């Protein structure tokens, strides 16, 4: 074990970097050992591993992904990958997370927030996909509220937006074999919840911070 | 392995390349120290970056030739892979093309180089233009997405023809059996690469020195008639002077070089047109960090198959 990183994790990260030919740009901040929540658009299984592998090793060792329990506990391989290899924080987005009121479509249970706060601890960082599920890659879905609640509970943790480009073409949802293409990963400027900022306003701002990092096809 | 070292003429060819690199490095250094603060500085920095890249490319190429035929096949296989990856990144594909792309990358491409490896000329020459090009459209049709169908199928066919099929003709030179030239085929590959790449370089140099009238301004603002004529003529002269390393007479070598240069130029022009069409501004980001393999080999992709078939027609009984 190197820095507490599972050897498989390093191997998979190297493979993912090779397949995705990813070019990383720190546009709004520099790699830093402080506690952070990296949040990005989600369109491929490669998203997490590519983002994770783009971090320097000492930061990588303390950065954990947030993953959906219902999906990642389904098969032994997925369980092994999330629990042993990547030390993922598994959250149940199933029954408890269903909207209780139609006007609150993205309600996330309080205990889920507590679990994430617990996972952050005093030295960990998290990788988080606020859309909650993989999209087609063409347009980002709305952000779930977890990011907002988490930010309120831990205002000391930096929220770093990131945009992953082209990974949906390399390994789209529903496919098992990747096709090699070049991809881009851009980290943006950290943001925080402003004094008294409403949930919807913040989530929209966070979503725009991610979308604004898009490089191909952007004006 | 290392048979190449026993071929004195091959060693001379490499010595010549090394000499050229040294000379250009010295010139680059002199230019840099002379023009410290004026407007030509970016051009000179770009020139020096290019020279550094040439050192690396030559070292890799020399290593491949030293290893022998397998080395060249692996090298060109990797180049094909990188070029195809670049091309597919730039060309818009749709979600439904995924399976077809997978086949192209992981079956058709390795198979092409494998066929050269086992020296099966008959199949190597038709596998992609016949089999793969007939396979691609139905494979996309099965995916059930009709949007821009003809466009998507043609773009993939074109990409695989240029990045894989055409380029694979360069290492395929090693399987030509030319009477009286057995065992020296690595020289033929080196000859093609030197003339083709020097034609690019000399066109750049002549263009920078005296270039004025643009050939096709919209396609490539850097291509001028002065650069083209000067580059082609001087690269042809160089190719002619290298006749001793080939199975050609000096006159034949001049003809071959001229054809390599002109066809190579047309390849560069076509790939520039494609990049402008796709919108180079957006994709510049992608290519910048990755060196733009396709930019480097576009001329070779066009020149290699023509050169191969000319040699095969006239020199292989």
Image: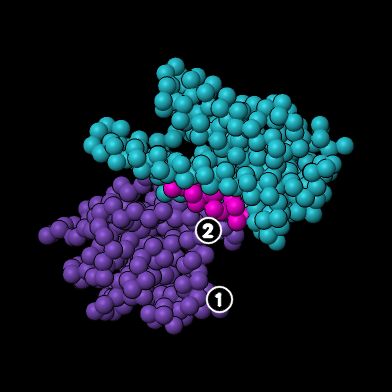
Chain colours: A purple, B cyan
* Residue that appears at 68% across and 50% down: B8
* Residue that appears at 47% across and 67% down: A13
Instruction: Classify mark 1: helix, strand or loop.
Output: helix
Q: Earlier in the sequence, mark 1 or mark 2?
A: 2
Q: Which mark is residue A19?
A: 2
* Residue B55 is a magenta residue: yes
* Residue B78 is a magenta residue: no
User: What stretch of residues is rendered in magenta?
Assistant: B52-64
Q: Main secondary structure of the magenta part?
A: helix
The Cα atoms of the two marked residues, 1 and 2, are separated by: 21 Å
Q: In the figure, residue B304 lies in which quadrant?
A: top right
- Where residue B177 sits in the image (x, y, percent)? 82, 44
- Where residue A119 sits in the image (x, y, percent)? 31, 77
Q: Residues within 10 Å of mark 2 (few under 14, many from 20)?
A: many
* Residue that appears at 41% across and 80% down: A2
Q: Are marks 1 and 2 on the same chain?
A: yes
Q: In the figure, residue A203 lies in which quadrant?
A: bottom left
> Is B244 left, or right, of A104 in this rendering?
right
Q: In the figure, residue A109 lies in which quadrant?
A: bottom left
Residue B310 appearing in the image: yes
Q: Nearer the viewer, residue B109 or B59?
A: B59
Residue annotated with mark 1:
A77
Q: Which mark is residue A208?
A: none
Cβ–Cβ under 8 Å for marks 1 and 2: no
Given the current orientation, which residue lies at the most extreme right position? B317
Q: Chain of mark 2?
A: A
* Residue that appears at 32% across and 71% down: A59
Q: Nearer the viewer, residue A144 or B273?
A: B273
Report the mark closest to the observer, 1 or 2: 2
- Where residue A219 sits in the image (x, y, percent)? 34, 37
């Amino acid at each position: 074990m190197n820095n507490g990183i599972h050897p498989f994790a390093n191997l998979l990260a190297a493979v993912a970097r090779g397949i995705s030919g990813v070019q990383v740009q720190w546009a709004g901040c520099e790699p830093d050992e402080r506690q952070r929540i990296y949040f990005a658009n989600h369109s491929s299984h490669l998203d997490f591993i590519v983002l994770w592998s783009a971090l320097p090793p000492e930061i990588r060792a303390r950065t954990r992904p947030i993953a959906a329990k219902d999906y990642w506990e389904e098969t032994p391989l997925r369980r092994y990958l999330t629990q042993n290899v990547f030390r993922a924080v598994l959250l149940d987005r199933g029954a408890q997370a269903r909207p209780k009121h139609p006007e609150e479509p993205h309600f996330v249970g309080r205990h889920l927030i507590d679990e994430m706060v617990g996972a952050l601890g005093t030295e960990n960082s998290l990788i988080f996909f606020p859309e909650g599920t993989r999209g087609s890659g063409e347009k980002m879905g709305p952000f779930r509220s977890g990011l907002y609640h988490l930010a309120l509970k831990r205002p000391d943790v930096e929220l770093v937006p990131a945009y992953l480009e082209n990974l949906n073409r390399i390994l789209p949802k529903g496919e098992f074999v990747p096709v090699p293409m070049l991809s881009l990963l851009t980290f943006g400027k950290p943001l925080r919840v402003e004094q008294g900022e409403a949930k919807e306003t913040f989530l929209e701002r966070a979503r725009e911070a991610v979308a604004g990092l898009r490089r191909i096809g952007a004006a | 392995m290392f048979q190449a070292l026993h071929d004195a003429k091959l060693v001379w060819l490499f010595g010549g390349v090394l000499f050229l690199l040294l000379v250009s490095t010295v010139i680059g250094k002199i230019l840099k120290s002379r023009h410290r603060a004026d407007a030509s500085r970016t051009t000179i920095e770009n020139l020096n970056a290019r020279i550094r890249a040439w050192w690396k490319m030559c070292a890799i190429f020399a290593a491949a030739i030293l290893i022998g035929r397998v080395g060249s096949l692996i090298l060109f296989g990797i180049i094909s892979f990188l070029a195809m990856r670049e091309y597919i990144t730039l060309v818009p594909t749709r979600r439904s093309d995924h399976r077809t792309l997978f086949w192209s990358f992981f079956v058709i491409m390795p198979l092409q180089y494998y066929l050269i490896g086992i020296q099966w000329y008959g199949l190597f020459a038709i596998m992609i233009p016949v089999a793969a090009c007939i396979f691609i459209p139905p494979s996309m049709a099965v995916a059930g997405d009709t949007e821009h169908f003809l466009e998507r199928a043609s773009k993939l066919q074109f990409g695989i023809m240029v990045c894989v099929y055409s380029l694979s003709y360069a290492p395929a030179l090693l399987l030509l059996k030319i009477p009286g030239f057995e065992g020296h085929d690595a020289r033929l590959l080196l000859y093609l690469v030197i003339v083709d790449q020097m034609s690019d370089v000399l066109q750049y140099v002549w263009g920078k020195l005296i270039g004025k009238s643009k050939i096709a301004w919209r396609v490539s603002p850097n291509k001028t008639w002065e650069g083209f004529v000067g580059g082609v003529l001087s690269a042809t002269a160089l190719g002619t002077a290298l006749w001793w390393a080939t199975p050609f007479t000096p006159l034949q070598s001049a003809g071959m070089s001229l054809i390599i240069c002109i066809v190579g130029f047309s390849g560069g022009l076509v790939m520039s047109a494609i990049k402008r069409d796709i919108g180079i501004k957006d994709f510049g980001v992608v290519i910048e960090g990755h060196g733009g393999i396709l930019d480097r080999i576009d001329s070779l992709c066009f020149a290699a198959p023509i050169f191969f078939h000319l040699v095969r027609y006239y020199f292989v009984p």
